[in-house]
Amino acid sequence: MLYRCARDLVNQKLRRQYTQFSRVLPLPLSQTIHLKSRICGAINTMATLDETKDIWKKSDAVCFDVDSTVVIDEGIDELAAYLNKGKEVAAWTVKAMDGTISYRETLRARLEIIQPSRQSIETFVKEHPPRFTKGVQELIKALHARDCHVYLISGGLRSIIEPMAKILDIPNERIYCNRLKFYFNGKYAGFDEDQPTSREGGKPEVVRSLKKQCGYKNLVMIGDGATDLEAWPPADAFIGFGGNQVRPKVKEQSKWFVNDFAELTQALKEN
Ligand SMILES: [Mg+2]
């Protein structure tokens, strides 16, 4: 009991420092990310593997990243390859992942290269049914059977993610991702910059507002990437996923890191 009180006090202090810090810090993006991850790392040491498993078993909401988590591929890269822009876009994808340039900038640059039209997206989606990660459909079914709300939170594109959400029985209002804009003739006209997932810190922002609006007590974020890890906190727990890609930083900082979704489905049965 005494230990728990002490831990909560430390947690509250760190969270306060982090909030103040992210509001006022006038540092370049790369330094901000570095310092943020150090502070978040300090906060994250507060949740143990057992606590993460406990939160998982009583989760009332689970937010999945999409690319390299729910599906094997990276959607924007696949679309680029389909439209013969794969090589040009891959260079920007690396920049997006190493955090030296803002996510929005890399998203803008990649879409400018790809120039996806309404028509090309429709054909792409028709010809590329989603390649789901092994075990994810069973896991989402098991979560739905427990009345747990399942969300998809992604820096990817809604026009590619909606068809896969339909197969997974996830309603459109539980998808948070980026929206493309088109001119009347179907040509690419940019993307909706109001979507939180188009900017730095977008995933934590979505998670924070879900907790506030819906009052979730045990919200779990699952993903392979640094931006997924960044959503904990405000997520109550984070589970790193390495079934498609293993990101060393994510593996190192996850209290629970799994390579197979069957492990998570099994854990739900142990209640
Ligand atoms: Mg991912």
Image: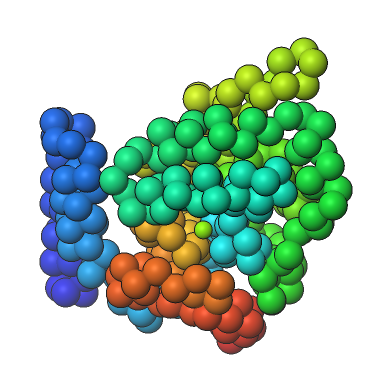
Nearer to us in this view, 131 or 264? 131
Residue at (63%, 20%) from the top-left corner? 189
What colour-coding does the image apply?
Answer: rainbow
Q: Position of residue 144 (x, y in %)?
A: 71, 62
Left or right? Give the position of 20 relative to 156.
left
Q: Position of residue 199 (x, y in %)?
A: 42, 35
Numbered disc total: 0
Residue at (67%, 24%) from the top-left corner? 188
Left or right? Give the position of 200 relative to 217.
left
Q: Position of residue 177 (x, y in %)?
A: 58, 40
Left or right? Give the position of 255 relative to 58.
left
Q: Position of residue 13 (x, y in %)?
A: 13, 51
Nearer to us in this view, 231 or 33? 33
Residue at (71%, 66%) from the top-left corner? 132
Residue occupying the far top of the picture: 184
Residue 55 appearing in the image: no
Q: Quadrant of the N terminus?
A: bottom left
Q: Quadrant of residue 104?
A: top left
Residue 237, placed above or below residue 260: above
Q: Quadrant of residue 202?
A: top left
Residue at (62%, 44%) from the top-left corner? 85
Nearer to us in this view, 246 or 120? 120
Residue 37 appearing in the image: yes
Q: Quadrant of the C terminus?
A: bottom right
Residue 151, placed above or below residue 52: above
